[in-house]
């Protein structure tokens, strides 16, 4: 057994019995409680408030005289292992050979469609392995990735991810979603193929990117029938635009209720919700809540893609010069939270045509989401977007993921910060990682590994 003393844990990640116990500071600006943790093997055994400052040099009574090794964390902010609920490992780290210099959404689709011709199993494995090693070095312990499944490359991608799931089993929980055009589910033969591939490779959910069209309701019905046959939920890319008429989220909620769909449904992006008439948007949020749909915001990628503007084209048709964006692509996170909808934030794409940067660092996602979406105004709830929120969406909450609580995985991030303000003010700061009863190495892979192979 190992006892880690004086860890300042986000209130949102503690057991309910401790969440109202902020240690004297204002929880609106410093939402943590200093605790002593005991770890036995790979699980947290006890979490108790640290003794008062007057006796802070002594362990809490609940863990005295255990004979355990003790490490004093000296009031460091400590998060549980992080979860990244929306990624694209099959596309990751392709920017060096398939860049998107204009940063446009439809350019990204075209560029990566061409690049997919190079997605051999060796190529997919090398890039995805690099991405998982990066995520592991940053303290992520669970990842869900979408895989393009509507084409031949989907079979290869699923084979690679199934192999990696086994290789990373003790370090990262890897889930997969079969990403397809919803039109595929109007074809019985194509729907059967997707179900067969997804089932054989143990996909967690079926997914797709619905677009506004007259057949949308039928497409949703076909998708849900296929998912019901497979016995899995849905993970969708929805309304990734600033178009007010895009209401695929609303249609998804109506379809869940109409089909009485019994499995979890998560909708990513939902950007257009933020530009719709407030009354209409509020009624959609109510439908989302009634349908039990979870929402995943992707602030980094949408900040990058949405709102790209240029001056009018020149007389010979050349592109106009870039203009400052007015629209930043963030969905109605606060309104969804107020409605009691489970929300999370994810990395989305990493160093590919949809997002030129990123490193699968869920802490970067958290810190930037706080800034971009003004989550500082609800700081006590904010850690949930990369901890308890994604844990619930991924079905890992019942195994203690996303929390620092008895029975939770003994995976922790220890930051060189004593307050949330320090943590958020210096986002690139180092961190130490606890795995089990000891600290583990934190080695970020070198980009030279990717540059060595086309």
Image (tube, rainbow, N blue to C red):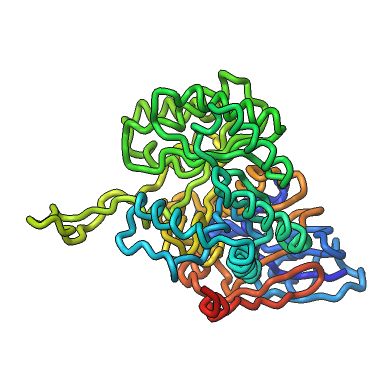
Give 86 or 391, whichever is nearer the viewer: 86
Q: Residue at x 67, y 58 (%)?
A: 160
Q: Residue at x 56, y 18 (%)?
A: 258
Residue 298 showing in the rendered view = yes
Across and down, in percent, residue 420 comes to 53, 64
Q: Is residue 437 above or below residue 242?
A: below
Give 56 or 307, whichever is nearer the viewer: 307
Across and down, in percent, residue 11 comes to 63, 53
Q: Is residue 84 left or right of residue 298?
A: right
Across and down, in percent, residue 356 comes to 42, 64
Q: Residue at x 82, y 64 (%)?
A: 38
Q: Is residue 273 left or right of residue 343?
A: left
Quarter where residue 354 is shown: bottom left
Q: Is residue 217 above or below residue 300?
A: above
In the picture as drawn, the residue positioned furthest to the left comes out as 315
The N terminus, quarter of image: bottom right
Q: Residue at x 41, y 29 (%)?
A: 282
Across and down, in percent, residue 256 comes to 57, 25
Q: Is residue 55 above or below residue 326?
A: below
Give 69 or 313, whichever is nearer the viewer: 313
């Amino acid at each position: 057994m190992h006892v880690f003393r004086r860890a300042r844990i986000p209130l949102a990640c503690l057991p309910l019995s401790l969440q109202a116990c902020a240690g004297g500071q204002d929880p609106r600006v410093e939402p943590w409680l200093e605790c002593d943790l005991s770890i036995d093997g790979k699980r947290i055994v006890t979490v108790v408030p640290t003794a008062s400052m007057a006796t802070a040099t002594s362990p809490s009574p609940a863990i005295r005289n255990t004979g355990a090794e003790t490490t004093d964390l000296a009031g460091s902010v400590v998060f549980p292992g992080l979860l990244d609920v929306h990624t694209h490992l099959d596309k990751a780290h392709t920017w060096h050979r398939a860049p998107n210099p204009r940063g446009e959404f439809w350019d990204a689709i075209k560029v990566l469609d061409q690049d997919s011709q190079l997605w051999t199993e060796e190529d997919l494995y090398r890039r995805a392995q690099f991405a998982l090693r990066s995520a592991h070095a940053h303290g992520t312990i669970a990842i869900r990735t979408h895989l393009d499944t509507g084409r031949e490359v989907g079979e290869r991608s699923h084979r690679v991810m199934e192999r990696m799931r086994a290789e990373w089993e003790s370090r990262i929980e890897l889930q997969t979603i079969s990403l397809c055009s919803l039109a595929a589910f109007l074809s019985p033969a194509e729907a059967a193929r997707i179900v067969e591939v997804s089932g054989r490779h143990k996909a967690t959910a079926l997914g797709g990117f619905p677009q506004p069209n007259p057949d949308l309701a039928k497409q949703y019905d076909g998708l849900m029938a296929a998912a019901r046959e497979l016995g899995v939920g849905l993970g969708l890319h929805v309304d990734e635009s600033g178009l007010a008429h895009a209401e695929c989220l609303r249609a998804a909620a109506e379809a869940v209720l109409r089909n009485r769909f019994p499995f979890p449904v998560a909708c990513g992006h939902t950007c257009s919700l933020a530009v719709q008439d407030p009354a209409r948007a509020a009624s959609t949020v109510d439908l989302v809540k009634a349908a039990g749909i979870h929402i995943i915001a992707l602030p980094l990628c949408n900040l990058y893609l949405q709102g790209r503007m240029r001056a009018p084209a020149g007389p010979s048709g050349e592109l106009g010069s870039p203009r400052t964006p007015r629209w930043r692509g963030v969905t109605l996170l606060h309104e969804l939270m107020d409605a009691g909808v489970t929300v999370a934030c994810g990395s989305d794409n990493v160093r590919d045509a949809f997002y030129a940067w990123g490193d699968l660092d869920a802490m970067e996602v958290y810190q930037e989401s706080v800034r971009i979406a003004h989550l500082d105004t609800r700081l006590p709830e904010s850690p949930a977007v990369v901890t308890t929120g994604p844990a619930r969406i991924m079905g890992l909450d019942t195994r203690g993921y996303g929390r620092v609580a008895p029975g939770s995985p003994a995976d922790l991030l220890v930051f060189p910060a004593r307050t949330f303000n320090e943590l958020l003010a210096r986002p690139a700061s180092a961190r130490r990682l606890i795995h089990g009863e000891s600290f583990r190495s934190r080695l970020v892979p070198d980009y030279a590994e990717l540059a060595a192979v086309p």
